[in-house]
Image (spheres, helix red, strand yellow):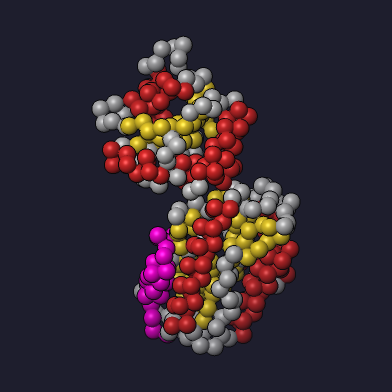
C-alpha cells in the first residue's frame, strides 16, 4: 500500500474524529485495520489520534507490523496484562473521548475495556464513545491503488471461469466444479477465494447461497456459479448461469428476463441515485415478466476489502451512489423445485455511469 494513500486515509479519519467530537479511536475491525495501516496480521489494534498513529500486536507479528506499517509506532501486547498495552498507548494520546468500533467489539472485550479504564486516575480517564461506520464510510469510495487490486481480483475470477466452464460435463458433481474453479483461481495468482464458491445445479439453483454438494450435474438444467478471488486483501465477485447441452424454452425465458434486468440496471444506474433507486431499475423488469416474487434479495452490494460492504444496493439502500464506488449488480429468479438464474457483475461508477469490471461473456452456452 502506497504511503501517500495511507496518509490520506489517516487524514480523512482524523477529520471524522473531529466531526464526531473524538480525540482518539481504537480500531479493532480487521479490514479497517488493514485499510488504515497496511498491516495484514490476524491480531492487533490501532490507536489513532490527531498526533499519534500506534499499532498494537503480539510477538508473532512484531516484525510483520514493522514491515507493513512502518509509519506506525509499535506498542507490544504482553500476556501478563491483557490491556496494559492500551493504557500505555492512551498515556501518549491522552484522550478525553475514546471511540471504539461498536459493531466489532465483543461484550467481553468491552467489559474488560471499561475495567481497565476504571483503573486510571479519574482526571485522566477517557469517556468511552461507541462509533459506527467511521472507517467504513471512508472505504466506500475506492482510491486508485484499491482499484488496481480489485481489477486484478476480477481478472483472476474471469480467467478461472474461462478455463473451467467449457469443460463442465454431465456427470460431474457440484463439488468437482467448485474445486476446479478454486484451483484455477489459485493457479492464476489469487491469495485466497473471496467466499465459499457456489455451484448450484438444477433445483439447488433455487437456493441463492447453496453450498456445493455431491449432486450430479445433468444436461439441460441451469447451473448457477458464484465465485470470487482475493488479492492483497481485495475481493472480486461474479456469477454466471450456464447449462450443459441445450436449454429448454422455460430456461431461455427465465435467463433472458434476468439478463434483461441486469443489462438495464447497468445501462441506467448513475451517480446521484440511491441504492434503492438502482435496485428498482432491475426489479421493474422482473416484475413485468411475472417473476417479481421470485427475486427476493437485493440487486447488489458494495465490495472491496470485504465481499459484502457499503453501499447497499437494494430496497433498504439509502446511501447515495457516488464516483468511484464499487458494487455488484446481480438480479436473480429462483423457482423452488426447478432451479434458478442469477447473473452478476462488479461495476464502478466513473463519469456518473457504471463501468463493468468483470468481463466473462454472458450466455447459457
Picture quarter with the C terminus: bottom right
Q: Height in image: 154 above or below 81? A: below
- Comparing 230 with 202, the one in front is 230
Picture coordinates of residue 123 (x, y %)?
Answer: 46, 11
Q: Which residues are magenta?
A: 170-195
Q: Is residue 40 above or below residue 333?
A: above
Q: Residue at x 42, y 69 (%)?
A: 188
Front residue (pair 247, 158): 158
Front position in the image: 297 or 29 = 29
**How many numbered discs?**
0
- Residue 60 position, x and y percent, is 28, 42
Q: Is residue 13 magenta?
A: no
In the figure, 223 relative to 310: above or below? Answer: below
At x 34% / y 44%, what residue is drawn?
64
Query: In this view, which residue lies farthest toward the bottom?
Result: 246
Query: Percent x, y for residue 246?
Result: 54, 88
Q: Is any atom of residue 351 visible in this view?
A: yes
User: Where, by quadrant of the figure, is residue 135 drawn?
Assistant: top right
Q: Does the magenta run of residues contain 191?
A: yes
Q: Quadrant of residue 359?
A: bottom right
Side of 136 relative to 321 (left or right)? left
Amino acid at each position: 500500500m502506497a504511503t501517500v494513500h495511507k496518509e490520506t486515509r489517516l487524514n480523512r479519519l482524523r477529520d471524522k474524529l473531529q466531526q464526531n467530537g473524538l480525540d482518539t479511536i481504537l480500531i479493532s475491525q480487521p479490514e479497517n485495520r488493514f485499510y488504515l495501516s497496511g498491516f495484514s496480521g490476524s491480531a492487533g489494534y490501532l490507536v489513532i489520534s490527531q498526533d499519534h498513529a500506534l499499532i498494537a500486536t503480539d510477538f508473532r507479528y512484531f516484525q510483520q507490523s514493522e514491515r507493513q506499517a512502518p509509519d506506525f509506532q509499535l506498542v507490544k501486547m504482553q500476556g501478563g496484562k491483557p490491556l496494559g498495552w492500551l493504557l500505555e498507548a492512551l498515556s501518549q494520546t491522552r484522550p478525553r473521548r475514546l471511540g471504539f468500533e461498536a459493531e466489532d467489539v465483543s461484550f467481553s472485550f468491552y467489559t474488560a475495556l471499561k475495567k481497565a479504564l476504571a483503573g486510571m486516575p479519574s482526571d485522566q480517564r477517557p469517556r468511552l464513545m461507541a462509533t459506527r461506520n467511521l472507517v467504513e464510510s471512508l472505504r466506500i469510495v475506492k482510491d486508485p491503488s484499491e482499484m488496481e487490486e480489485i481489477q486484478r481480483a476480477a481478472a483472476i475470477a474471469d480467467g478461472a471461469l474461462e478455463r473451467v466452464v467449457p469443460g463442465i460435463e454431465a456427470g460431474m458433481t457440484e463439488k468437482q466444479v467448485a474445486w476446479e474453479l478454486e484451483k484455477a483461481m489459485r493457479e492464476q495468482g489469487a491469495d485466497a477465494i473471496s467466499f465459499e464458491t457456489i455451484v448450484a445445479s438444477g433445483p439447488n439453483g433455487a437456493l441463492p447461497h447453496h453450498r456445493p454438494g455431491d449432486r450430479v450435474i445433468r444436461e439441460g438444467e441451469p447451473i448457477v456459479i458464484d465465485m470470487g478471488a482475493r488479492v492483497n486483501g481485495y475481493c472480486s465477485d461474479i456469477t454466471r448461469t450456464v447449462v450443459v447441452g441445450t436449454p429448454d424454452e422455460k430456461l431461455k425465458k427465465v435467463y433472458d428476463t434476468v439478463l434483461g434486468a441486469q443489462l438495464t440496471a447497468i445501462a441506467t444506474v448513475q451517480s446521484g441515485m440511491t441504492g434503492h433507486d438502482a435496485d428498482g431499475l432491475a426489479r421493474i423488469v422482473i416484475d413485468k415478466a411475472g417473476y417479481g416474487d421470485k427475486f427476493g434479495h437485493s440487486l447488489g452490494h458494495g465490495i472491496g476489502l470485504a465481499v459484502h460492504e457499503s453501499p447497499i444496493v437494494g430496497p433498504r439502500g439509502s446511501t447515495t451512489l457516488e464516483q468511484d464506488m464499487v458494487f455488484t449488480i446481480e438480479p436473480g429468479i429462483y423457482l423452488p423445485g426447478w432451479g434458478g438464474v442469477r447473473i452478476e457483475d462488479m461495476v464502478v461508477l466513473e463519469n456518473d455511469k457504471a463501468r463493468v469490471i468483470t468481463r466473462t461473456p454472458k450466455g447459457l452456452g
